[in-house]
Image (cartoon, rainbow, N blue to C red):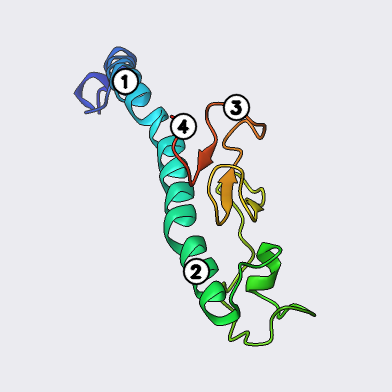
């Protein structure tokens, strides 16, 4: 059998396919790069505005005041939790960046409580996710 009769891809054809794939990846990658950070911010906002806020409000309904810390939502506190019917949260309140949510009661921005995440940079800055509006 002659080498010229074999059906195979040439090096040029393979290189052309690799270049085309590279161009496609270069066009699509920048559009997807910011999506994971955007999803983390949305998850933190949902935790703050829905799950943790609901747990705090349920604790307050049962006990007449908000807890001293978020751990009181999972473990009955030694004092002040006489009507505790928890756990109000099933797991520790950790933000999408692996840090604990910050909780203060009474709050500096809200009368009842402030709860927030320091966001991707891990320090107080404009990217923090909070339960208050920035126009205060």
Q: How far is mark 3 from mark 2, CA to CA?
A: 27 Å
Foreground: disc 3 or disc 1: 3
Mark sitting on residue 125: 3
Which of disc 4 and disc 1 is earlier in sequence?
Answer: 1
Helix, strand or loop at disc 1?
helix
Instruction: Residue 88 in the image: state x and y as whole percent.
Output: 56, 76
Q: Identify which residue is drawn at 55% across, 42% down.
A: 109
Which of disc 1 and disc 3 is earlier in sequence?
Answer: 1
What residue would you read off at disc 4?
A: 134
Q: How far is mark 2 from mark 4, CA to CA?
A: 23 Å
Foreground: disc 1 or disc 4: 4
Q: Nearer the viewer, residue 35 or 126?
A: 126
Q: Quadrant of the N terminus?
A: top left
**Is 1 situated left or right of 84 in this image?**
left
What residue would you read off at disc 1?
A: 14
The quadrant holding residue 32 is top left
């Amino acid at each position: 059998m002659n080498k010229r009769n074999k059906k195979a891809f040439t090096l040029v054809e393979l290189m052309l396919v690799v270049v085309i794939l590279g161009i496609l990846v270069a066009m699509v990658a920048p559009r997807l790069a910011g999506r994971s950070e955007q999803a983390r911010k949305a998850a933190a906002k949902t935790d703050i505005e829905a799950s943790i806020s609901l747990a705090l409000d349920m604790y307050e309904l049962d006990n007449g005041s908000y807890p001293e810390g978020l751990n009181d939502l999972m473990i009955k506190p030694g004092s002040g939790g006489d009507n505790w019917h928890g756990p109000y949260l099933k797991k520790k309140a950790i933000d999408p960046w692996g840090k604990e949510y910050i909780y203060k009661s009474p709050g500096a921005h809200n009368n009842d409580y402030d709860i927030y995440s320091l966001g991707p940079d891990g320090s107080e800055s404009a990217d923090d996710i909070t339960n208050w509006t920035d126009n205060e």
